[in-house]
Amino acid sequence: KEKRQVLFMKRESFRSRLGFLLVCAGCAIGIGNVWRFPYVTGENGGGFFVLIYLICLLVMGVPVLTMELAVGRAGKKSAVLAYKNLEKPGQKWHIHGWFCLIGCFLLMMYYTTVTGWMVNYFGKFLTGAFHAGMDTESVVGEFGAMLSNPGEMTLWTELVVVAGFLICSFGLQNGLERVSKVMMLALLALIVVLAVHSLTLPGAAEGMKFYLLPSMDSIRKNGLGTIIAAAMNQSFFTLSLGIAAMEIFGSYMSDSHSLPGEAVHICALDTFVALMAGVIIFPACFSFGIETESGPALIFQTLPNVFVNMAGGRFWGALFFLFMIFASLSTVLAVFENILAICMDTFGWSRKKATVINGLLLLVLSLPCVFGYNLWANVHLIGGRDILDTEDFLVSSLLLPIGSLVYLLFCVTKWGWGFDKYLAEAKRGTGMKFSPKLKLYFQWILPILILIILIQGLI
């Protein structure tokens, strides 16, 4: 206990529990919630998918989240050194910490580009580039024109990188926590305003019926197996597990509250935003006769077409993309903090030195994704994917599930930290507790579910 107190005294910490919850939720809340969740829901027929997604989130997402937080809180360091502090002599679990760092870099190499798209579209609605009376071809053409312009793409991507590292340079409390709290509270306010407006549109009831009422038609059309697999994927990836993006915040948290309770709170905020994103999008789509199965194009091509045909659409479009900026930038800040923490802990760098070096690295490393749509448009890598999709495949289909499996095996097997030590750490503090009876599920069933996600992603 004394050793833990000394470690905690030396470690940066959050100013408040609210700050911890909002920062962690901000890390989880991102384009996976506000972009991927609505279009995957649309592709899989709505209601049944949402129901299965919520179940998967509870039985898979919450347990793995507690494990990542437990490694951070018990180890009191970022990924590499936290593993070293907890592993038995001679073990090599800490090698996974280096893969976590690689995963964070890979994620940010394309995530900053997509965040730049959000900033650009916010500016377009704000300045009137999107306006009432635009035809569908012109609206869709704006996205293609942006992608084909390397200068425009570079400007917004690099702006996101600079802004993110600048905020993190002020420290955990004065930078990340302070800005994330403002952004997350603004995000929650914006999402309520946008959802209420969407529900007042004509035809909104049909959109909500499609979204939330389970229908056998969706099973007949998509197949139950396909819907379950998609829900498992979405519930798992929405929390950004497996690359220590959450582990770092465990290292900053106190022993006051139990990890299952905190994990449920984080998942609740994450799920609220995802569900409300659907409340914003589906009534609007049904109101204007827009196809709900338009896939990834939903946000940047389909919805702008809805806004330009809506009364006050320029205002609502700007508000929507401001909400999208807050959602995606909160993840950028959280992952940047993880990168900085690993470098400060492992190499002994100051925060200023870590900020400058990693900022310059990502300014360069983000360019391949930018150029992948214009100067390097003919470059196709794994499976014929373009650069962004290749980077996303490496993170989403490999590093996240494999990393989560490593955290799981480290926490629940005798070859790692061990189930008893993990459970004791998870139960520390007030709040919800896990039962020791879950050991069989954690050791045998949960690894199989993660392996199914891994294999499915590879297929």
Image: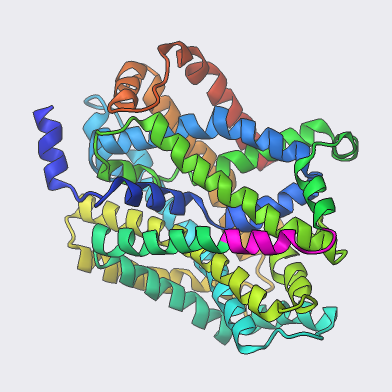
Image x and y of residue 153, in percent: 57, 80
Q: Is residue 286 magenta?
A: no
Can residue 305 be seen from the camera position used here? yes
When the figure is inspected, residue 246 is found, relative to residue 135, above or below; the finding is: above
Q: Is residue 199 magenta?
A: yes
Q: Is residue 99 left or right of residue 383?
A: left
| Residue found 60% across the figure and 27% down from its top | 449
Please state, as top left, top right, bottom left or bottom right, where the N terminus lies in the image.
Answer: top left
When the figure is inspected, residue 307 is found, relative to residue 238, above or below; the finding is: below
| Residue found 35% across the figure and 73% down from its top | 360
Location of residue 219 (image quadrant): top right
| Residue found 45% across the figure and 54% down from its top | 26
> Which stretch is magenta?
191-203
Q: Is residue 382 left or right of residue 80?
A: right
Q: Is residue 74 left or right of residue 33?
A: left
Image x and y of residue 291, in percent: 85, 60
| Residue found 30% across the figure and 27% down from its top | 430
Image x and y of residue 422, in percent: 33, 23
Q: How many numbered markers are drawn?
A: 0
